[in-house]
Amino acid sequence: MFSKGSKLYSIFTGTCPKCHEESMFKNKNPYILSEALDMHETCSNCGTKYKIEPSFFYGSMYVSYAVGIAFAVAAFVISYFVFNAGLNAMFISIVATLVVFMPIILRLSRNIWINFFIHYDKSFAKSKK
Ligand SMILES: [Zn+2]
């Protein structure tokens, strides 16, 4: 399910959605905040242009809403059912989760967004190497 060729592989590793060979992001560590959203223009392996159209990644904001909700629900479930937290503690844990995971949420939503539009193509995998 997470192997090369599935969309989940590209989404969770941040690799090129077409060939799954190269990282789309210049810096692999999302917590270098100044470079968190720095992406390559094109894939160095297959030449796919990531920014399909101007402001393409604005659309990922819709996705980041859904991804943020997923993280918030996870924080709620863990704090409520695992730690038996009260209302204030749950609220704090949800806010803290969203803040701490923000770089990951932003990247995940970009990965999901671009994977809506670009699909894996086996023939591009390591074709130029
Ligand atoms: Zn590629």
Image: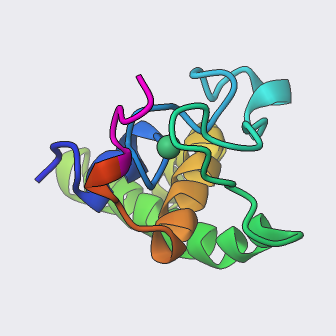
Confirm whether the magenta stretch covers residue 126.
yes
Secondary structure mostly taken by the magenta-highlighted segment of the chain: loop
Residue sitting at the far front: 128
Q: Nearer the viewer, residue 17 or 93?
A: 17
Residue name at image x 33 percent, y 59 percent = 121
Q: Nearer the viewer, residue 102 or 50?
A: 50
Q: Quadrant of residue 30?
A: top right
Is residue 20 shown above or below 1? above
Residue name at image x 19 percent, y 48 percent = 82
Position of 55 with respect to 122 (left or right) is right
Q: Nearer the viewer, residue 34 or 11?
A: 11
Find residue 101 and report its horizontal and vertical position in percent.
56, 41
Residue name at image x 50 percent, y 47 percent = 93
Per the rendered image, the range of residues in magenta is 124-129
Confirm whether the magenta stretch covers residue 14.
no
Q: Quadrant of residue 127?
A: top left
